[in-house]
Amino acid sequence: MSATVTHSNGAKAAATNAVTALIGASGFLRFHPTGSTVTTPGANIASLPFSATAFAAANSTTGVATANAITSDTNATGGTVAFASFQTSANAAIVHCAVAASASDINMTGGLVVASGDTVSCSALTYAALSQ
C-alpha cells in the first residue's frame, strides 16, 4: 500500500521561506554544465545576481515564492547548460535543478548553448520547497 504525503498550506510556505532564506543577501542564480550536483555545482556558465533579498515571501496558500529582480550576466563564461543552482554569496549551493529548452525545472528559451561573452537573463523564477 502506498501513502501520499501532503502538507498544510502553512507548512508549504514555511518550508519554502526557510530554503530561500538560506540563500541570504547577494546570492546568485548560476548555470552549470552536465555533471553538476548540489554538492559540486561545477563550472559557472553564467552567473546572475539575485536582488539583496532573492525571493519574496512564499504565498500562504500555494507555498510558491517568486524571485525578486535578477540581474543579467552580460559577459557569460559560456558552455552548454544542463543544471542551475541558487547559491549564497559565498558560493554554497542551496538549490540545484535541471535546465532544458522546455518541460524542465528551468526552461531556457534562447537555447542551452551559451557563447563566451553572451548575455544571459532570467525574466521570471518561482520556487516551492514542497509540492503537496
Image (spheres, helix red, strand yellow):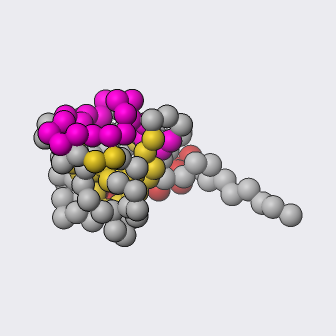
Name the one closer to the observer, 117 or 18: 117
Residue 28 is a magenta residue: no
**Image quarter for residue 116?**
top left
Name the one closer to the observer, 130 or 33: 33
Q: Which quarter of the image is occupied by the N terminus?
A: bottom right
Q: Outermost residue, bottom direction?
A: 39
Q: Is residue 58 above or below residue 121?
A: below
Question: From where the camera sits, is residue 7 visible?
Answer: yes
**Image quarter for residue 122?**
top left
> Residue 126 placed where, x, y %?
41, 39
Q: Is residue 12 above or below residue 117?
A: below
Q: Outermost residue, right direction?
A: 1
Name the one closer to the observer, 43 or 6: 43
Residue 119 is a magenta residue: yes
> Residue 26 placed where, x, y %?
17, 52
Q: Answer left or right for 13 relative to 89.
A: right
Count of residue discs: 0
Q: Which residue: 18% across, 48% down?
A: 77
**Image quarter for residue 3?**
bottom right
Q: Which residue: 25% across, 34% down?
A: 121
> Residue 108 placed where, x, y %?
38, 35
> Residue 105 placed where, x, y %?
48, 44
Question: From where the camera sits, is residue 86 visible?
Answer: no
Dominant secondary-structure state across the stretch colored magenta: loop
Give the extent of the magenta segment: 104-123
Q: Which residue: 66% across, 53% down?
A: 6
Q: In this view, does 94 lie above or below 28?
A: below
